[in-house]
Amino acid sequence: MALSIDPHPTLSKLPSEGVIVLYNLSGQCSGEALVAFPSEELAGQAVLERSHHLLYGHPIRLAFCT
């Protein structure tokens, strides 16, 4: 039996209700989302782990807001 280890556990454990996908006035996805983390520490860790990674060929830009 192989053990699967998630290289980015911070993001994989977020509840789906903590993610809000934003849409434009035409109803199309704007490419932006708001993500709520259970703590500032986890939010900062996610910014460090995932900023500038590619998603569908585009770099992810993360900002930490309080």
Image (cartoon, helix red, strand yellow):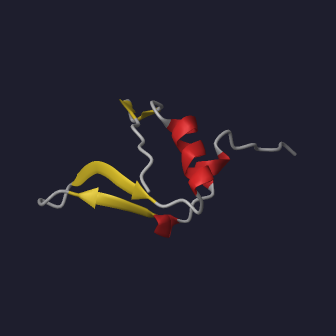
Number of numbered discs: 0
Residue at point 39% right, 37% down?
61
Residue at point 56% right, 65% down?
15
Residue 23 image point, x, y percent: 23, 58
Residue 43 is left or right of residue 7, and the answer is left
**Which quadrant does the C terminus fall into?**
bottom left
Residue at point 56% right, 36% down?
48
Which residue is the extreme one toward the left? 26
Residue 62 image point, x, y percent: 42, 41
Which residue is the extreme one toward the front? 66
Residue at point 87% right, 46% down?
1
Residue 9 image point, x, y percent: 67, 48
Residue 57 is left or right of residue 3, and the answer is left
Residue 54 in the image: above or below residue 17? above
Residue 58 in the image: above or below residue 32? above
Residue 28 is left or right of residue 31, and the answer is left
Which residue is the extreme one toward the bottom? 17
Residue 64 in the image: above or below residue 51? below
Residue 28 in the image: above or below residue 17? above
Q: Nearer the viewer, residue 60 or 1?
A: 60
Location of residue 7 (image quadrant): top right
